[in-house]
Amino acid sequence: MPETVTAGLDTTSDAGLLELITTEDPAQEEALFAEARRLRAEHYGSGVYFRGLIEFSNYCKNDCYYCGIRRSNARAERYRLGPDEILNCCRMGDLLGYKTFVLQSGEDPWFTDDRVVEILAAIRREFPDHAITLSIGEKSRESYERFFHAGANRYLLRHETADDAHYRLLHPASMDLAERKQCLFNLKKIGYQVGAGFMVGTPFQKPEHLLEDLCFIRELRPHMVGIGPFIPQKDTPFGAYPPGSLELTLRMVALARLILPSALIPATTALGTLSPQGREKGLMAGANVVMPNLSPKAVRKLYSLYDNKICTGDEAAECRLCMEGRIRDFGFEPDMSRGDWAAGSRAAN
Ligand code: 5AD
Ligand code: FES
């Protein structure tokens, strides 16, 4: 079903989208946020889904120029949780009420497919009804199939930028946008609920690149879309570049909601790092998911993709309670259920 021109907001044409990305008209911007909130409410009410995030390794074989855990960053203190520690995080998460575990790491060769499958099987045995989300990077189609059959339900793999030339400015030559996009299509075909996404305000990014991100989202129709501002990490090649803008990031969240009204869209930690109420503003711009940290406190600071990441200190002992309070203050309702993508609406498949 084609999206229609709603509330005077044209999301069907490139020109219309570009205008919404770049508009300096506050009335148009407010109409965009209002429409995003309306669609969010129509599809998900006032609920905000909670996902327990387990950052289980910061070893990475890749060398993305923006990322603090890139291989060449000799100053990153590396850690990796073993299978038992990961399982213990899940147990802790379950006690706290989480029904979704998100297992995220750098592309760490120690975690061979066999090891990942073993870990998934162990979690599945103990938590047959929980959702398991993987976020461990680019793998072969066969690997994705093995993980799926071992119990993974969802997969997060941001495309980062949908423009080839821009992608090459953010990544070494060994990385290829077409391959990354192919991974996303493979994941979808296998049957995962799939999350794509991109950063806002990376070096050299132009409004036209953001337009391409939206067009790619419209083509892929992922179930989830992760959008966060770029934030510099001082030990990376992009350490001296300015962070992305809060306003523009919120605008992209709202546009993702307009393009995929039933998508699951997180209010990201990077948004909360950029601005004290960034995540709450993300919810007001159409997001409907938060991903509090479940990693052991000792390693939280080490998963430093960017500087000054929130939820890494003592105050983060119980992100769930903190997040619940913040959400209620903005009129939303915490929802600890699995929060699968709502079928029957206009996104995906
Ligand atoms: N600023 C913001 N987000 C970043 N990511 C990686 N490095 C940074 C950074 N410096 C994001 C990427 C990745 C996700 C896990 O974190 O989009 O996919
Ligand atoms: Fe993590 Fe508030 S949500 S400390």
Image (cartoon, helix red, strand yellow):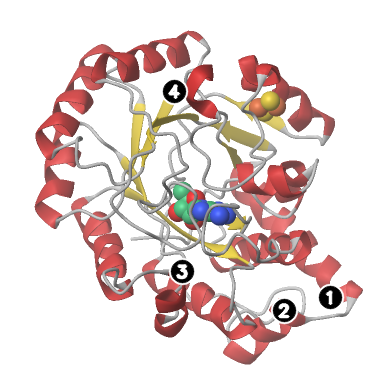
Q: Residue at x 73, y 49 (%)?
A: 274
Where residue 281 appears, x then y in whole percent? 77, 48
Label 1 amino acid?
Gln
Q: Residue at x 78, y 63 (%)?
A: 247
Label 2 amino acid?
Leu
Using the image as rendered, state which of residue 94 and residue 135 is in the foreground.
135
Extreme-bottom residue of the structure: 15
Q: Earlier in the sequence, mark 4 or mark 2?
A: 2
The Cα–Cα distance between marks 4 and 2, rounded to whole angstroms, is: 36 Å
Q: Residues within 10 Å of mark 2 (few under 14, many from 20)?
A: many
The answer to whether the residue bearing label 1 lies less than 8 angstroms from the nearest atom of ligand 1 is: no
Q: Quadrant of the C terminus?
A: bottom left
Q: Earlier in the sequence, mark 3 or mark 2?
A: 2
Q: Which residue is mark 2?
A: 20
Label 3 secondary element: helix
Q: Which residue is mark 1?
A: 28
Q: Which residue is mark 3?
A: 217
Q: Which residue is mark 4?
A: 99
Q: Can I make out residue 323 in this image?
A: no
287 in relation to 169, above or below: above
Tags 2 and 1 in contact by the CB under 8 Å rule? yes
Where residue 331 appears, x then y in whole percent? 81, 35
Label 4 amino acid?
Lys
68 in relation to 95, above or below: below
Where residue 46 appears, x then y in whole percent? 70, 38
The Cα–Cα distance between marks 4 and 3, rounded to whole angstroms, is: 27 Å
Label 4 secondary element: loop
